[in-house]
Amino acid sequence: MGTIDLGALVARIVREWDGVDVRPYRFGGVEVRLDHREVGHVHMSGIADLLMPVRLRRDLVAAGRAEPHRTQPHSGWISFRMRSEHDVPAAVELFRLNYERLRGSVRRRAVTSVVTNPTLLADRSTDDLPA
């Protein structure tokens, strides 16, 4: 049985968004850019990393929607671990949140709904990952 390229699944969706450029990531995987700014990237291991404002990162981590970044846990970077194709919609929702934020079109209510609404992001509360 072959391995599913989760980064390719994410890339297939986000490359359709206006102004998005998807390219190979320098450390393996794929990188998503909007107007020369990184929206996020997905490593070959299936871990998506995105840079958010620290307050939003804190809210996403507190809500169980993402983890602090493995090597920069006190920065604005978050990580989202995809284990299967079932985790792709939640990863795409994080990319969409950051994409909209970088475009300047996200409103506070939209951010709050993504952070607090478990139907928008996969419910990570049952994961075996440390908080």
Image (cartoon, rainbow, N blue to C red):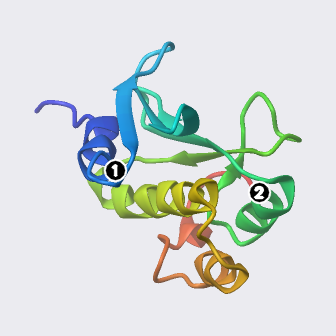
Q: Residue furthest left?
A: 1
Label 1: which residue?
14
Front in this rendered view, residue 63 or 50: 50
Question: What type is the residue that disc 2 sits on?
Answer: Arg
Quarter holding residue 87: bottom left
Location of the N terminus by quadrant is top left
Percent of width and height locating residue 91: 45, 55
Q: Residues within 10 Å of mark 1 (few under 14, many from 20)?
A: many
Q: Residue at x 66, y 78 (%)?
A: 107
Q: Residue at x 35, y 53 (%)?
A: 18
Q: Residue at x 37, y 35 (%)?
A: 21
Percent of width and height locating residue 33: 48, 36
Q: CA distance from mark 2 to mark 1?
A: 21 Å
Q: Secondary structure at mark 2?
A: helix
Q: Residue at x 61, y 84 (%)?
A: 113
Label 2: which residue?
57
Percent of width and height locating residue 95: 49, 54
All told, the count of numbered labels is 2
Quarter holding residue 37: top right
